Amino acid sequence: MDATVQLTADLIRRPSLTPDDAGCMELVAAHLAPLGFRCEWLDFGATRNLYLRRGRASPLLVFLGHTDVVPPGPLEEWHSPPFEPSFREGFLYGRGAADMKSGVAAMTTALARFAAAYPEHRGSVGLLLTSDEEGAATDGIARVMEAFAARGERIDWCLVGEPSSAERLGDVIRIGRRGSLGGTLSVFGVQGHVAYPERVDNPVHRFAPALAELVGTVWDEGNEYFPPTSFQVSNIRAGTGADNIVPGRLEVLFNFRYSTAVTADDLKRRVQAILDDHGLRYALEWRLSGAPFLTTGQELVEAVQAALEAVVGRRARLDTGGGTSDGRFVAATGAQVVELGPVNGTIHKVDERVRVEDIPTLSAVYQRILVNLLAA
């Protein structure tokens, strides 16, 4: 069996539900430590973070990934056990097959081959792994970047192995991500009996016109690389469960996925202005999960495109869609960040899978990127 496919299968066998690494990082370290990679554990709380680096000079290219996976869901809906790798009709099945244990395996073997072929490569190469990407992400790469900043370590280029491809391997690379700004809104009223409307103040009724305005607002037009900013309500909760009581409080959870055409502070100010205009009594808490980032017209993007041309015979479409990734924490330090990984059609789904032939191909693309940037 191909070495990268074998490593992917071995990683799938480890049920690494966030934040449990389940031994995945030790397996990766065993592949790279004999080739001159220094292993550094940067654990915070229950989260494991492993940094493997070869070389001390600049520039520094780091592959970024995560070993944790989301829960498999109902086991009876899987056609094979989620943590037992299964090969069927050209696909490898298992939780994490695409998101992102095949990417981690491809990074590992690409780095191993590159180090063996170019032992005197210029600059430095590294692999950074966390077990807290699918969860709160508070003790993962965000904390590692704080540690790097404290000691003056700077990443020049970062390639994230998240599943970016849409229909076939390498058809899309992400050169940025939208920002994510969440809000928890509490609207206050006066509780009472529904039969006495003159004695109550219904927060649901009060909020309805404001909600219509929030939904109908054009926050920006987007730009060349980003779609327009999106406002979405994810949860609304009010009432006691009884049908004869007007609630005294309404809670709303909402989220902005926003472009570089607007800032988080702009969005906060405009939301609060709408709420104030409607005369609401409210409390509002914000949570910024990550600011938008964009990498264009720089060495890393071209190195990735050239590698794809050489290995799969085509260049990728540049994209900034999807959710957030740990790349946002690295981009905030000034690094160039690009995401390239397997097809994402089954991520987080029952019977998650990756095409077997794509796994060694992805590793070959990663190795060519290393050659393009750092071959001596």
Image: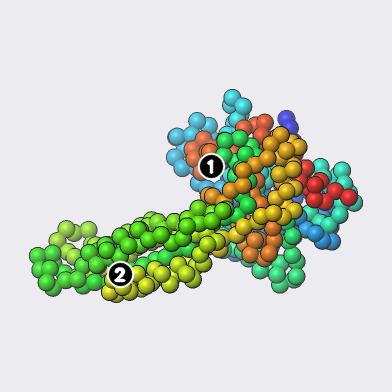
Which residue sits furthest left? 195
**Mark nearer the N terminus (1 vs 2):** 2
Q: Secondary structure at mark 2?
A: strand
What residue lies at 52% left-to-right and 59% top-to-bottom?
Answer: 259
The residue nearer to you, when weighing 165 against 93, is 165
Instruction: Tell me the tag on residue 187.
Output: 2
Left or right of 123 in this view: 247: left
Instruction: Tell me the tag on residue 298.
Output: none
Q: Is residue 169 above or below residue 137?
A: above
Label 1, on which residue? 347
Please state which amino acid type lies under the numbered disc 1. Ile
Cα separation, mark 1 vs mark 2, equals: 36 Å
- Quadrant of the image containing the N terminus: top right
The residue nearer to you, when weighing 190 against 322, is 322
- x and y percentages locating residue 305 in the rendered image: 71, 44
**Are there few (<14), some (14-19), or many (20+) residues within 10 Å of tag 1?**
many
The reply to whether residue 51 is visible in this rendering is yes
Which residue sits furthest top? 89
Quarter location, residue 251: bottom left
Q: Is residue 360 above or below residue 19?
A: above
- x and y percentages locating residue 371 in the rendered image: 81, 46
Left or right of 261 in this view: 210: left
- x and y percentages locating residue 60 in the rendered image: 78, 58
Q: Secondary structure at mark 1?
A: loop
Q: Nearer the viewer, mark 1 or mark 2?
A: 2
- x and y percentages locating residue 330 in the rendered image: 65, 61
Left or right of 84 in this view: 199: left
What residue lies at 86% left-to-right and 54% top-to-bottom?
Answer: 122
